[in-house]
């Protein structure tokens, strides 16, 4: 299995619930290392740029409003098979469909307020990591 990097975001709903530590614990206990981390509060326009791939979807405007409603924590995670592993730990996008014990099953309230985001491919991971971090911010441990 290849060492990969992926972008994780703890969304405004999970930040408001004060569960940053619980989410990070799951990453670290499952072999993912945080190699960059930044708390920030996106404007609606910045959220729109980050989610530009969804611009034509009916939920795009609500998504941008929600993602700019409070602070978020952006992280670059590194580890074996990091992209799929992070998505496994997150659970399904819709928390009603998320497997028991996943982050979204435990902390998400709805498909909009779904606690976390994770890159879905190597190509998108590179784009998304680059959105938040420069090379100087990233401290590989592999
Ligand atoms: P995320 O993994 O951050 O990627 C896009 C987000 O859009 C997704 O999580 C959801 O929070 C949100 N969203 C809202 N409605 C939908 C939908 N019908 N399908 C996919 N994503 C949706």
Image (tube, helix red, strand yellow):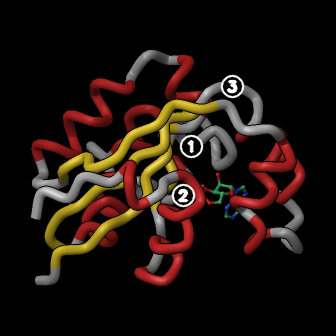
Q: Secondary structure at mark 1?
A: loop
Task: Residue 5 in the image: state x and y as whole percent.
Answer: 31, 67
Q: Distance from label 3 to label 2 (Cα)? A: 20 Å
Compared across the picture, whether 94 is left or right of 52 comes to: left
Cβ atoms under marks 3 and 2 closer than 8 Å: no
- Residue drawn at x 45%, y 79% as measured from the top left: 121
Task: Residue 3 in the image: state x and y as whole percent.
Answer: 17, 75
Give the label, 3 or 2, closer to the camera: 3
Q: Distance from label 2 to label 1 (Cα)? A: 7 Å
Cβ atoms under marks 2 and 1 closer than 8 Å: yes
- Mark 2 or mark 1: name the one nearer the start of the chain: 2
Instruction: Point out which mark residue 70 bears.
Output: 3
Q: Which residue is mark 1?
A: 114
On screen, residue 82 above or below 20: below
Q: Distance from label 1 to label 3 (Cα)? A: 14 Å
- Residue drawn at x 37%, y 26% as measured from the top left: 20
């Amino acid at each position: 299995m290849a060492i990969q990097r992926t972008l994780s975001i703890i969304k405004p709903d999970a930040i408001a619930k004060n569960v940053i530590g619980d989410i990070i614990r799951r990453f670290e206990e499952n072999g993912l290392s945080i190699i960059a981390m930044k708390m920030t509060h996106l404007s609606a326009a910045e959220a729109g740029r980050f989610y530009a791939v969804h611009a034509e979807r009916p939920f795009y405007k609500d998504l941008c409003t929600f993602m700019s409603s409070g602070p978020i924590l952006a992280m670059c995670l590194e580890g074996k098979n990091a992209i799929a592993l992070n998505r496994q730990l997150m659970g399904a996008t819709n928390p009603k469909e998320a497997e028991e014990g996943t982050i979204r099953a435990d902390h998400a309230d709805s498909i909009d307020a779904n606690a976390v985001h994770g890159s879905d491919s190597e190509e998108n991971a590179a784009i998304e990591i680059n959105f938040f971090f420069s090379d100087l911010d990233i401290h590989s441990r592999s």
